[in-house]
Amino acid sequence: MYKILLTIGFLCLTLNTCIDPYVLNLEEYESLLVVEALITDEPVPYTIKLSRTFQNQDTLPDMVTHAEVSVKDDDGNIATFMEEEEGIYKSDPDLFTGKIDETYTLFIRTNDGLEYESNPCLMTRVPEIDSIYFGPGSEFFENGTIEEPGIQLYIDSRNETVNSKYFRWDYEEVWKFRVPYEIGYKYLGDEEVISIPVENYIGWKYRYSKDVFIHSIEQQQTNNIKKKALNFIASARSDRLRVQYSILVKQYSLSKSEYEFWKSIKQVSESGGDIFEKQPYFISGNIHSKNKINEKVLGYFQVSAVKQKRKYITYRDIVDFNLPIYQYPCDLIVDGPIDYEDPEGSQPDPPPTFQELYDKYTGMGYVFVYPQYSDSLPESLERLAFTTRECSDSRATGDPEKPDFWVDLP
């Protein structure tokens, strides 16, 4: 949401017409406060991020530090958020947990004395997620020029006892992967190679949802949500489905005003790369300045109960779909003093030693992975194999530590 809001704020401040090319006038640039805040009924620390819009894509966001941030309920209780990192404020779960049917208001006072306040927000109930399931599908990439097969994930939710009409979802993906080349050998020099225990060949990767997933049942004949499409995974574009994949889906209930906010965010984010394709406009949230009536504030103070459900998918689950499988773009180099594949070609004189080859490739950032011996003389070392760290060490692209919640399926 942060990047989308910055784009909207940036465009609505710099674009003068939909016909003439726009010219960025830095003298008229106005820094807008960006607020990211979500309060739920989960007993966890809640995070509120404060920053200001930046002038161009090459400028880092300016985090708002040393602010006073608090949330007040309709009984007058106040929860204070402490700054743990620059611009990132967190609550204490032992002192504050959101409650259903309570109303909350966000207050911000910046270091320069400016004050901001949200509209009061009611924490509404949200129904359970019944099921998460998947099936084969396809999606277009590269500006609609390439169709890729994969799996489409869906959810069902029965809304029979909860009077909610508007919903939003986000999710966290975690998947187990195995590097293509395990490091099971160590080169000691003088043509001596020993076996070592294989480590860091398995890891886990994490990814949070970036798209906007919302739904309204206002015009439906039933309150139930059936086959709501969420994440699509193109099987050949990532290693998510090579071993085991997990998705944790969270379901939130929205007020009508928050639904309209996210609907506008979704429309802008899906309008494409051409900024003249759709007239950019300011998306009003529920936070306003108490000092300056006309000051724009980007973001929304979100308050909602939450329900969540996790789904695991293994390679065995999708094998019958006959989907293409992701291939790691690994650079494997196998080299030795003598080029046996081109014995008539030009050979250096004298040929390089194994130590020189080892130093050459490791100096270039490659990792030694295995030796290659002669077929006729098993003890005679012929070549050394090297690859990139990304293809031989799970720490290069993921976390070798197994998540606490993870369950390995057969």
Image (tube, rainbow, N blue to C red):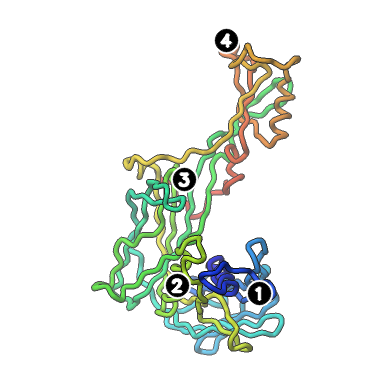
- Residue 352 location, quadrant: top right
Q: Amino acid at mark 2?
A: Ser
Task: Pick the residue in front: 182 or 345.
Answer: 345
* Circle 3 crowding by C-alpha within 10 Å: few under 14, some 14–19, many from 20: some
Q: Which residue is mark 4?
A: 376
Report the mark closest to the observer, 4 or 1: 1
Q: Amino acid at mark 4?
A: Ser
* Picture residue at 32% right of the left edge, 66% below the top: 157
Label 4 – label 3 distance at C-alpha: 41 Å
Label 1 – label 3 distance at C-alpha: 39 Å
Q: Which residue is mark 1?
A: 29
Report the mark closest to the observer, 1 or 2: 1
* Picture residue at 34% right of the left edge, 76% below the top: 165
Q: Amino acid at mark 1?
A: Tyr
**Percent from the top left, x then y, of residue 265?**
47, 70
Q: Which residue is mark 2?
A: 264
